[in-house]
Image: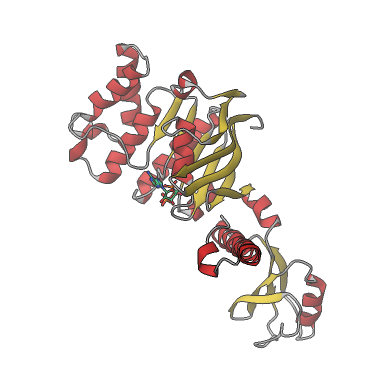
Amino acid sequence: MTAAALEVDRVRKSYGKRRAVDDMTFDIRAGELFGFVGSNGAGKTTTMRIILGVLTPDAGEVRWRGRPVDFAARRQFGYMPEERGLYPRMKVGEHLRYLAELHGMSSAAARKAAGRWIERLEVSSYASEEVQNLSLGNQQRVQLAAALVHEPKALVLDEPFSGLDPVAVDVMRDVLAERAAEGVPVIFSSHQLALVERVCHRVGIVGAGRLIACGTVQELSESAERRLLVDAPGAGEGWTAGLAGVEVVSREGTRTRLRLAKGADDQQVLHAALATGPVSTFVSEQPPLTELYRDLVTRDDAEATAGATAGASAAAGATGATDTETKGGGR
Ligand SMILES: Nc1ncnc2c1ncn2[C@@H]1O[C@H](COP(=O)(O)OP(=O)(O)OP(=O)(O)O)[C@@H](O)[C@H]1O
């Protein structure tokens, strides 16, 4: 799982004056489950649409196996759009056969593939029903079947887990893991960070149209502030007072969770804990993705605001423009 299969290279896209995607660069490797996360409006859907060729970028390039993606390459991709895209009046089985044939499968192969995915996604009892008669969660299972029915070589899925019940989440997760194990690169967006952390090999975090961090959860945690869990039964409230760069995240009974700013000395923390009596636990903790995400996005927002303010001051100094006129121009 090392070769970059799908590469997004310095992609940019604006809608009118709004820059939706800005210099977006990352890759997805063969056999990798890549989680694409970010706040609402960060640019995930726009990026995925560009990968699929539904939108054309203003600049940059998407490559598949080292070559710019063209129509033939895109035909090999499976896509689950955010707005979903099934014909409501078509029957589930017919619909899947139709999509498989559209991708060039023979009628017999299309029938076989449709049957297989209907079974795998556990919607067999709805095969002869019109799509519109299925619950939203079951429509979503069919939508995944639609993305998979032509045996795609890459999968691009926009929020495939949203609105699914826990059993359907497990089915979806298992199917995506199976595809990845077969060597298929899979990118999916999601706001369910605990799930992304459990399932994905790597995660890309998007903020204001740019990739602000990318890597395994462990790699992301290395660039974040360190966390310590200390259990010191004799330590009262405020035992960390005076320790530079040390912030209490939470206290549960005798256990204190701490966040250490860059450069803060964990040995000082240990000394302070020992000064209160015995210390039964003193360990580094890897924060969950939810917390890493918050830290990284907050830090990025703060840097952007600082950049915008500096830019605005410089512009106001140079032109005499008012603050209001130059605000928001930093991103
Ligand atoms: N068709 C469009 N016309 C104008 N602006 C658009 C259009 N589509 C998206 N945008 C804007 O582009 C930005 C990125 O939107 P996008 O849908 O890519 O974000 P997202 O990360 O997928 O968000 P969400 O998590 O809410 O689905 C947003 O500011 C959005 O308002």
Q: Residue at x 26, y 45 (%)?
A: 136
Residue 291 found in image quarter: bottom right
Q: Residue at x 60, y 62 (%)?
A: 308
Q: Left or right: where does residue 153 sit relative to residue 3? A: left
Q: Position of residue 68 (x, y in %)?
A: 56, 24
Q: Residue at x 52, y 24 (%)?
A: 69
Name the colouring of the figure: secondary structure
Q: Position of residue 32 (x, y in %)?
A: 57, 36
> 231 or 291: nearer the eye?
291
* Residue 327 visible in the displayed image: no
Q: Position of residue 43 (x, y in %)?
A: 48, 47
* Residue 218 visible in the displayed image: yes
Q: Is residue 316 above or below residue 200?
A: below
Q: Left or right: where does residue 257 sit relative to residue 274? A: left
Q: Residue at x 34, y 50 (%)?
A: 163
Q: Position of residue 245 (x, y in %)?
A: 73, 75
Q: Is residue 279 above or below residue 316?
A: below
